[in-house]
Amino acid sequence: MQGSEKLQVMLIDDHPVVRAGLRAVLNSFGDIEVVAEAADGTAEVPAGVDVVVSDIQMPKADGIALTRRLVAEGGPPVLILTTYDTQADVVAAVEAGAMGYLLKDAPEDELHDAVVRAARRERALSPQVANVLAERVMRPDGALSEREIELLQALQTGASNREIAQRLFISQATVKTHLIHIYSKLGVDNRTAAVDTARQRRII
């Protein structure tokens, strides 16, 4: 493919060295051209971009916020390319409208395929990410809510019920109720086991 036939890609990642490496890899494919770059999700996407390849954890606006914005604006599809493979991140990205979710250790041919598929608005998920989603589907009754995942993330920092309540702007009674539901869904009976099980299942 030559000239305008190449897929036009924008890279968004807060690490310049990572962007440089990805730019070199993507441009080496021959049918893909990196035409724009940015360090966070607040950046404007130039006209003509076919797909945005973005990290998920970034300052100002992360990949989830970026995806929601571009979906709302009718912008180009987003392929999340990150090191984070927790259920919380994967589900949030997919629900926000990301067309793809790939891990940064993916082989180059997998990256190429994901960019092409995302540009066609076809779902592109790495095998690990597909497994994370399958785990959630296979455990529908045990799927944690967004609030319960937030509470688990607070638990793993060692925060007390009072600190969690203040952090999430809820009452301590509500924290206790959430904990009961979390323990039931995860099949555990204490905070430590809940965090350990959630990590094993890649929920947090």
Image (cartoon, grey):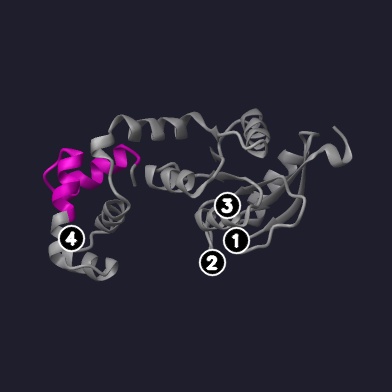
Left or right: 124 as drawn, with respect to 27: left
Q: Quadrant of residue 157?
A: bottom left
Q: Mark 2 points at which residue?
A: 60
Measure the alpha-carbon separation of dots 3 and 4: 33 Å
Mark 3 or 2, closer to the camera: 3
- Residue at the image point whose x is 62% and y is 45% from the top: 77
User: Which tag, 1 or 4, sits closer to the chain's start?
Assistant: 1
Give the mark, 1 or 2, whose residue is nearer the N terminus: 1
Local packing at callout 4 (Cα closer than 10 Å; few below 14, some 14-19, many 20+) is some
Which is the main secondary structure of the residues drawn in magenta?
A: helix
Q: Give the range drawn in magenta.
A: 178-202
Residue marked by disc 3: 71
Q: Position of residue 156 (x, y in %)?
A: 27, 54
Q: In this rendering, is residue 52 above or below 105? A: below
Q: Which amino acid does label 1 sit on?
A: Asp
Sequence-first tag of 3 and 4: 3
Q: Nearer the viewer, residue 120 or 33?
A: 120
Residue 28 quadrant: top right
Q: Mark 4 points at which residue?
A: 175
Instruction: Identify the amino acid type marked 3.
Output: Val
Secondary structure type for disc 3: helix
Q: Earlier in the sequence, mark 2 or mark 4?
A: 2
Mark 3 Cα shell of 10 Å, populated few (<14), some (14-19), many (≥20)? some
In the rendered structure, which amino acid carries the disc numbered 2?
Lys
Q: Which of marks 3 and 2 is nearer the N terminus?
A: 2
